[in-house]
Image (cartoon, rainbow, N blue to C red):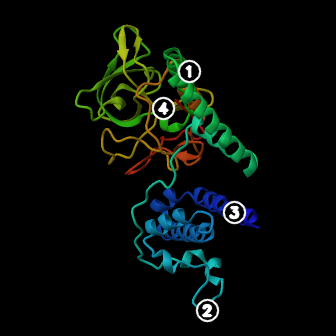
């Protein structure tokens, strides 16, 4: 019964997430604010209901959700004052108009691959199996301690074993997530043609770092030079620098191309976005790599899911490239590959 209840709660969570994404609330915010308000109130109501349903399974989680909703946990209930469940049927009415929620914060941290494997091994099998493994682990630990005390060579072997285990853990591949890309809003201060390559531009781009970065882009055939001047763009900043016909390129300007590659347009952040702001992806949390390792093919793996949608919004798997001032877009290319 408990397992079925948890499955039901997770099903509601999945349906609520699909509702929020399919409604495209970021577009409604600009085009239809009343509809956007209904979507947000309904979504927050669903969050409230989930916190009530999951309280028997994860009480600390529910307390934190009610805190972020700015609601007292002791008053949370699926029923109204009469004891009826009608409140659950109208989630858009749960939070009163004008209610201010608390500061949203991630409720769960992202587990690394080695942590997932550790938990899988730790909790595999029945309770009896886990107790047996725990006792075996304690016995092994005691034997190792006795071995360390026995001889100096025993200590050396133990240290070598630990070093080998640490090295093995260090080789576990990091998950390829979109958060590993460092995409920022930049301002092209100056653009000119490459002195030794007719198809390349050389741009000096301000990324809020003090000094501008030099970026080489193959856009001469597609975008007039005058349109490259004093323009805000989205820039992938943690590619490994590369020499482009004698000039070192320190980043890459993102652009969308049509299916036949005859048309290319820059990805435009909102004009009011602050230079240097990192572009984010709602629902994804994490810090970018300092420099992407070319051998790991991180950019190549993620790039195939970067594209403009039918509304000309730049997306990763239908999640918009987002800034504090709104989403990033292209001028006219729909369903175009972004690179």
Q: What is the spatial separation of the Cα atoms under label 4 and label 2, in whole angstroms?
A: 57 Å
Numbered mark located on residue 255 in the image: 4
Q: What is the spatial separation of the Cα atoms under label 2 and label 3, in whole angstroms?
A: 26 Å
Question: Residue at horizontal 48%, vertical 44%?
Answer: 321
Give the foreground label among 2 and 1. 1
Mark 3, residue position: 6
Answer yes or no: is residue 306 visible: no
Q: What is the spatial separation of the Cα atoms under label 4 and label 3, in whole angstroms?
A: 44 Å
Q: Nearer the viewer, residue 70 or 265?
A: 70
Answer yes or no: is residue 97 visible: yes
Helix, strand or loop under label 1: helix
Q: Position of residue 59 (x, y in %)?
A: 55, 66
Question: Residue at horizontal 54%, vertical 42%?
Answer: 315
Question: Residue at horizontal 54%, vertical 79%?
Answer: 93
Mark 1, residue position: 161
Mark 4 closeness class: few <14, some 14–19, many ≥20 residues within 10 Å: many
Sequence order check, earlier mark of 1 and 3: 3
Q: What is the spatial separation of the Cα atoms under label 4 and label 1, in whole angstroms?
A: 49 Å
Q: What is the spatial separation of the Cα atoms under label 1 and label 3, in whole angstroms?
A: 41 Å
Helix, strand or loop under label 4: strand
Sequence order check, earlier mark of 2 and 3: 3
Q: Nearer the viewer, residue 234 or 74?
A: 74
Q: Position of residue 180 (x, y in %)?
A: 48, 34
Numbered mark located on residue 82 in the image: 2
Helix, strand or loop under label 2: loop
Q: State which quadrant residue 115 falls in.
A: top right
Give the foreground label among 4 and 2. 2
Give the foreground label among 2 and 3. 3
Q: Position of residue 298 (x, y in %)?
A: 54, 27
Sequence order check, earlier mark of 4 and 1: 1
């Amino acid at each position: 019964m408990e397992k079925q209840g948890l499955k039901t709660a997770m099903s509601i969570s999945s349906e609520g997430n699909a509702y929020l994404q399919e409604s495209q609330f970021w577009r409604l915010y600009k085009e239809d604010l009343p509809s956007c308000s209904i979507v947000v109130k309904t979504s927050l109501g669903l969050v409230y209901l989930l916190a009530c349903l999951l309280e028997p399974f994860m009480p600390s989680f529910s307390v934190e959700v009610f805190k972020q909703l700015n609601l007292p946990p002791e008053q949370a209930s699926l029923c109204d004052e009469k004891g009826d469940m009608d409140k659950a049927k109208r989630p858009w009415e749960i939070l009163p108009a004008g209610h201010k929620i608390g500061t949203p914060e991630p409720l769960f941290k992202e587990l690394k691959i080695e942590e997932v494997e550790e938990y899988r091994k730790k909790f595999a099998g029945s309770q009896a199996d886990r107790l047996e493994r725990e006792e075996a682990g304690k016995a092994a630990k005691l034997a190792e301690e006795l071995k360390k005390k026995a001889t100096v060579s025993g200590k050396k072997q133990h240290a070598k074993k630990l070093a080998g285990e640490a090295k093995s853990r260090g080789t576990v591949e990091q998950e390829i997530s979109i958060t590993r890309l460092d995409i920022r809003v930049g301002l092209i201060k100056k653009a000119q043609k490459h002195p030794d390559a007719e198809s390349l531009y050389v741009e000096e781009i301000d990324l809020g770092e003090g000094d501008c970065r030099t970026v080489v882009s193959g856009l001469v055939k597609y975008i007039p030079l005058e349109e490259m001047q004093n323009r805000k763009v989205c820039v992938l900043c943690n590619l490994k620098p590369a020499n482009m016909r004698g000039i070192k390129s320190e980043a890459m300007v993102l652009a969308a191309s049509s299916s036949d590659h005859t048309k290319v347009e820059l990805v435009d952040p909102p004009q009011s976005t602050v230079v240097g702001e990192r572009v984010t992806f709602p629902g994804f949390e994490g810090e970018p790599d300092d420099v992407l390792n070319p051998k790991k093919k991180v950019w190549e793996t993620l790039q195939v899911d970067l594209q403009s949608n039918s509304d000309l919004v730049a997306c990763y798997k239908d999640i918009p490239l987002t800034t504090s001032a709104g989403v990033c877009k292209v001028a006219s290319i729909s369903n175009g590959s972004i690179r």
